[in-house]
Image (cartoon, grey):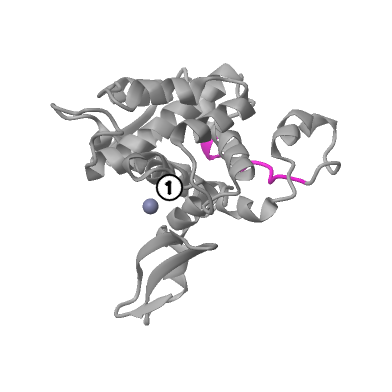
Amino acid sequence: MIADDGDRISSGSTYRFSGSAIRVRVGRMARETAFRDDWILVHEMTHLALPNVPQRSEWPPEGNGTYVEPIARAQAGQLDPSVVWRWSLEGMPKGQPLPGDLGLDNTHTWGRMYWGGATFWLLADIEILEETHGLLGAQEALRAINRKSGGNGVIWSVDQMLAAGDEATGTHVMSRLYAKMKTAPAPADMAALFRDLDVGERDGRIVFDDAAPLAAIRRRITEPREQPVAQGQFGHRRSVAASLVHSSHRKKDLALP
Ligand SMILES: [Zn+2]
């Protein structure tokens, strides 16, 4: 932790040495609210959960941090879901490809890396939830990747990481999306997507319509999930999810709600 001027948490970075480390700058005058409202540490902690990937592919972890951070805070009761969706609604269009785009692996702009990457994870989440009828989503895939890799301490290929996620959800959603988005612009119709999720803005406020086709998925994304439990501690109802989450390496799960 580096003491800084001011009253807020101003930046953070995550490193892999022989273990993991987060460096964060915190203002000497920071009060409790600065920590309660902070998103930087939550973003950095999501990096602890995933393996390192080759540098040209920084967008999957950066997009993941961007996507997971507000959802994690909403699931923990620190953020209203309307704030999560406001950020998606305003941020994700910044991740759309511009003319000359060569796909996420080859276009290293801020918008593509953070918001293009976040769009990948949103699309993956929705498709996994659709294919598994709401049983599993990106969260379960991420937990599986975390357990299999051990997190930030190892270097994996993106293919390896996404295959572990697909294996956990019994789908091919993430490898299919990656193949589509890594070397081609693959624009997404964000206006149609938010219409289906029915996230809209009226008079400056985020409004939802629970009759929209993807409304159940939208609610599912930000609602609190059960924390992983040790094998043998769960009952019959949880058995499918629990078979995906049991682990003796739970310490890393703190980064993924
Ligand atoms: Zn980051």
Q: Is residue 137 left or right of residue 198?
A: right
Residue 186, placed above or below residue 245: above
Residue at position x 49%, y 41% in the image:
156
**Main SS, magenta residues:** loop
Residue 30 visible, this angle: no
Q: Which residues are magenta?
A: 221-229
Residue 237 placement: quadrant:
top right
Residue at position x 75%, y 36% in the image:
242
Residue located farthest toward the left when viewing the structure as drawn = 99
44 or 249, which lies in front? 249
Residue 108 visible, this angle: yes
Q: Is residue 205 left or right of residue 69?
A: left
Instruction: Name the amino acid type tagged 1.
Output: Gly
Q: Is the C-beta of the residue carrying label 1 under 8 Å from the nearest atom of ligand 1?
A: yes
Residue 39: image location, x then y, percent: 42, 57
**The residue tagged with tag 1: helix, strand or loop?**
helix
251 or 238, which lies in front? 251
Residue at position x 40%, y 39% in the image:
60
124 or 238, which lies in front? 124
Residue at position x 45%, y 49% in the image:
69
Residue 208: image location, x then y, percent: 42, 31
- Does the magenta-highlighted stretch encompass residue 227? yes
Residue 68, placed above or below residue 172: below
Residue 14, placed above or below residue 146: below
> On the image, numbered disc 1 is attached to which residue?
65
The residue carrying pointer 1 sits among few (fewer than 14), some (14 to 19) or many (20 or more) residues within 10 Å by Cα, namely many
Residue 150, placed above or below residue 173: below
Rendered-image quadrant of the N terminus? bottom left
